[in-house]
Image (tube, grey):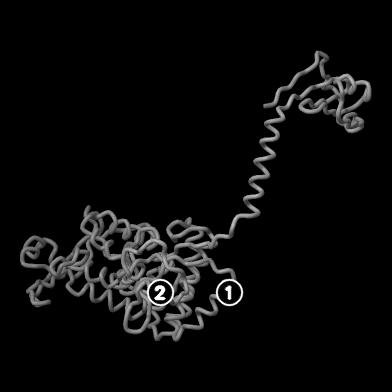
């Protein structure tokens, strides 16, 4: 508690800065009375202390008394010393951070379990039991010399696929530790974009550049015009949990690797308002669907697919139009997240094969994103051909 007592004489504030600088400072301690301050220092500033709790301040003849509770001051000092002692003598604690692991890792003929991943990366066992062996979160202990640790792990890579997986995981781990978060979706847009740019560059250098990729396919995955698709798919994966491999494979399939994009629509999303100009496309209908859609069918033929008789139809239908390619990618993520019929997809984690098997025609047990019975198989072929599953982290 601090209480200020002021003596009757008023303090004049018409002193110039130059005069104030010239004021003489007299410091005295252990005064018997406040009057001693006036006797000892008739001019300028003087400071005095009367033990244990009176502090005097004099300026040009005006004396102020500050009465301080010694118990309060003593409590502050004791608290400060206690905090200092705790910081000096507390035992060191291992720093552990939980990070995302790759869901699909090239370990030969099988996908590794979490226990295998933990063993390979020399990380401690989790304190709490994991729900299943395919979880995407494991604890990683903080490493003091990360450069040596990184080189040691990369030395285990037997091919460029393994090298990409290890380097990407170490990159993500280092980034999460640096920014003190446990998941990439906790990063802000700017930091997340920097991380995804680095992963995209790593994917181009270690994967695409080491393969025989047709020029138009290479351009589709690497060109920044009209947008960088890999980075965009990685951003959507972090924010909406749609595997980047599925997003990229769908965009590639629906547009012929970017060779037929109308209205910036990369995912074949229909326009329910029918305001856009109709486009000719191919759909597979059952007999009842064939009858219901006769108004938009241009031509048809009976085909047998998967033991079922279907109508392969050329139809004219309206498709959504977007202001930019990015808007199409974001609309695709929101579309899958908001539609209840697509909810089962998100129970599959980052398993692209499960997504591909489930996203296709309802005639074959899918959720009905497309009518083609081959839709899921085509997605899987694209993903496997260009190792897009390596982006699903």
Q: Quadrant of the rendered structure where residue 286 is?
A: bottom left
Question: Which mark is nearer the camera, 1 or 2?
Answer: 2
* Mark 1 or mark 2, earlier in chain: 2
> Closer to the camera, 207 or 259?
207
Q: Is residue 84 left or right of residue 304?
A: right
Give the quarter of the figure containing the N terminus: top right
Circle 1 residues within 10 Å: few <14, some 14–19, many ≥20: few
Q: Is residue 241 above or below residue 260?
A: above
Q: Left or right: where does residue 251 sit relative to residue 3?
A: left
The residue that appears at 76% across and 27% down in the rendered structure is 53
Q: Residue tagged by mark 1?
A: 147
Q: Is residue 325 visible?
A: no
Residue 91, x across and y down, in percent: 59, 58
Report if residue 218 is visible in the image: yes
Dot 2: what SS?
Answer: helix
Q: Residue at x 63, y 55 (%)?
A: 89
Q: Position of residue 45 (x, y in %)?
A: 87, 28
Structural distance between the alpha carbons of marks 1 and 2: 20 Å
Foreground residue, 123 or 241? 123
Residue 166 picture location, percent across and down:
46, 76
Q: Provide the residue designation for mark 2.
A: 117
Q: Position of residue 310 (x, y in %)?
A: 9, 72
């Amino acid at each position: 508690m601090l209480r200020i007592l002021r003596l009757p004489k008023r303090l004049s504030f018409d002193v110039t800065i130059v005069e104030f600088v010239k004021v003489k400072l007299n410091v005295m301690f252990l005064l018997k009375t406040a009057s001693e301050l006036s006797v000892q220092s008739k001019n300028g500033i003087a400071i005095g202390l009367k033990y244990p709790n009176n502090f005097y301040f004099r300026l040009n003849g005006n004396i102020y008394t500050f009465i301080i509770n010694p118990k309060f001051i003593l409590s502050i000092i004791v608290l400060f010393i206690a905090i200092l002692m705790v910081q000096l003598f507390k035992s060191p604690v291992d720093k552990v951070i939980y990070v995302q692991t790759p869901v699909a890792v090239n370990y030969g003929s099988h996908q590794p379990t979490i226990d295998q991943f933990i063993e390979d990366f020399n990380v401690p066992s989790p304190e709490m039991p994991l729900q299943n062996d395919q979880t995407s979160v494991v604890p990683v202990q903080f490493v003091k010399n990360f450069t040596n640790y990184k080189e040691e792990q990369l030395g285990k890579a037997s091919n460029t696929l393994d090298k990409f997986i290890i380097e990407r995981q170490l990159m993500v781990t280092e980034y999460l530790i640096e920014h003190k978060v446990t998941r990439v979706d906790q990063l802000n847009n700017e930091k997340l974009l920097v991380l995804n740019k680095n992963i995209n560059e790593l994917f181009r250098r270690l994967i695409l550049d080491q393969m025989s990729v047709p020029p138009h396919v290479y351009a589709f995955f690497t060109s920044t015009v009209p947008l960088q698709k890999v980075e965009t798919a990685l951003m959507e994966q972090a924010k909406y949990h749609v595997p980047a491999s599925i997003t990229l494979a769908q965009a590639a399939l629906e547009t012929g690797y970017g060779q037929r994009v109308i209205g910036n629509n990369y995912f074949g999303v229909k326009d329910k308002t029918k305001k856009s100009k109709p486009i000719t496309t191919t759909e597979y209908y059952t007999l009842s669907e064939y009858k219901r859609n006769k108004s938009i069918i241009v031509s048809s033929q009976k085909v047998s697919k998967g033991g079922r008789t279907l109508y392969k139809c050329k139809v004219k239908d309206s498709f959504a139009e977007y202001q930019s390619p990015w808007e199409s990618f974001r609309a695709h993520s929101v579309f899958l997240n908001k539609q209840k019929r697509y909810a089962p997809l998100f129970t599959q984690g980052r398993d692209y094969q499960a997504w591909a098997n489930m996203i296709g025609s309802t005639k074959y047990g899918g959720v009905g994103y497309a009518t083609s019975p081959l839709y899921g198989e085509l997605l899987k072929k694209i993903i496997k051909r260009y190792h897009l599953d390596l982006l699903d982290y």
